[in-house]
Image (cartoon, rainbow, N blue to C red):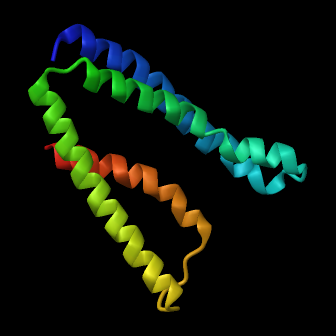
Amino acid sequence: MSRSIHRRYQREFWPAMVTYMAIMFLLWPLLPQVHNELLKIALAVLPIVPVLFVVRAMVRLVLGSDELEQRIHLIGLAIAATVVSTLSLAGGFLAAAGVIKLDGAILIWVWPTLVVVYAAGRG
């Protein structure tokens, strides 16, 4: 991978990630105190905006890579999708059977888990 592509990725990724973390640490805890429904919805989905910029940076990184690196990314993504979707399916079955109690908040962890497993799968 060329250095310029990697530098561009770093310039796009880190500001978006810092914004995401700031939203989650500074604004997300305020959510229970918000009583206006539209404001609550806006605040609840606000973290999606920097995540979309992270995804954009990742896509541009992969598209700027050579064929071998693209294949490695694809394998990592396939592994991540398989692991996370299988775990989600198992969790869904266990919750539906009443074996474990899960609420919708667990969905917040799907994306970070996918990214972590993707990074491990690429390795």
Q: Say if 33 sits above or below 2 in the image.
A: below
Quadrant housing residue 45? top right
Q: Which of the two residues, 76 or 31, is positioned nearer the viewer here?
A: 76
Q: Say if 91 sits above or below 109 in the image.
A: below
Quadrant housing residue 61? top left
Q: Say if 113 sits above or below 100 in the image.
A: above
Quarter placement of the N terminus = top left
Q: Position of residue 38 (x, y in %)?
A: 85, 45
Quadrant housing residue 23? top right
Task: List the single residue furthest toward the right.
Answer: 36
Task: List the single residue furthest toward the bottom.
Answer: 98
Residue at x-position 47% and y-position 77%: 92
Quarter placement of the C terminus = top left
Query: What is the count of numbered marks?
Result: 0
Residue at x-position 37% and y-position 55%: 113
- 104 sits left or right of 10 in the view: right
Q: Position of residue 85 (x, y in %)?
A: 36, 63
Q: Position of residue 11 (x, y in %)?
A: 39, 15
Residue at x-position 29% and y-position 13%: 7
Q: Which of the two residues, 11 or 99, is positioned nearer the viewer here?
A: 99
Q: Position of residue 114 (x, y in %)?
A: 36, 51
Residue at x-position 87% and y-position 51%: 37
Q: Say if 71 sits above or below 63 in the image.
A: below
Task: List the single residue furthest toward the left.
Answer: 68
